[in-house]
Image (spheres, grey):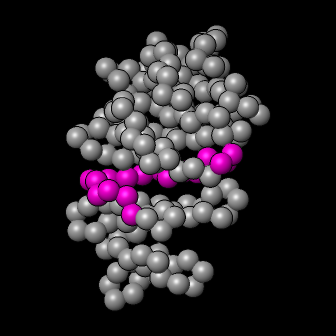
Amino acid sequence: LIQNGKHSVVLRGKTVEQFDLAGGLTFSPDGKKFCAIGRRGKAWHVWAAGRLSDPRPAYREPVYNPADGRLAYFAFENQRWRVIYDGRVGEAGSPLCGGLPFSPDGEALVFWAKVCNATHAVVNAKLGPPFEGVGEFTFGKTAALIGYLANYQGKLTAVVGHKPGPTFV
């Protein structure tokens, strides 16, 4: 909703926040929590639970933990993307990263990151083996079973739990 030239975040018919530009609207799996990403001037913020995050050059991919509703997202600062989870900023950073799903049981937070010219899957802050590229993540019922396709020496490799399997074309 745009009011007086501002993008308004409206919840239950009431304007709760206004930005120059807003997006990244995300509900928690139970529908009880909501967040939005918005820009004021050159600074971006995440609005969640009635609070505004610190200003940063960029934010993206907000996602709620399906088990407990805690929020995770990427924040950009000092030329690196970092994961912020439940308000805590992750130590590791990467100039390129993506994906940010939780396992269905909420026990694993997964993303890919470019580190030293290689792409790694990162599961609960643990770096997986290096690949030329990493595809979308898939899960079993629990965090114990995480899989993805990776590009290794020009071939696709099925990876389950950070263990590369057979390669194929």
Q: Residue furthest right?
A: 141
Image quadrant in which you'd find residue 160 = top right
Magenta residues span 52-68
Q: Where residue 121 sits in the image (x, y, percent)?
A: 50, 26
Instruction: Inspect the magenta stretch and tell me whether residue 61 lies in it.
Output: yes
Left or right side of 154 for 104: right
Left or right side of 51 for 169: right
- Residue drawn at x 35%, y 24% as measured from the top left: 115
The quarter of the picture where the C terminus appears is: top right
- Residue drawn at x 60%, y 63% as measured from the top left: 33
Image quadrant in which you'd find residue 37 = bottom left
Q: Where residue 80 sits in the image (x, y, percent)?
A: 29, 38
Left or right side of 84 for 80: left
- Residue drawn at x 53%, y 84% as measured from the top left: 14
Against 104, is 29 above or below? below
Q: Where residue 83 sits in the image (x, y, percent)?
A: 42, 40
Left or right side of 33 for 20: left
- Is residue 89 visible in the rendered structure shown here? yes
In the depicted view, which residue is nearer to us: 114 or 89? 89
Against 59, is 150 above or below? above
Q: Where residue 39 sits in the image (x, y, percent)?
A: 32, 66
In the depicted view, which residue is nearer to us: 153 or 61? 61
- Is residue 169 visible in the rendered structure shown here? no
Instruction: Inspect the magenta stretch and tell me whether residue 57 lies in it.
Output: yes
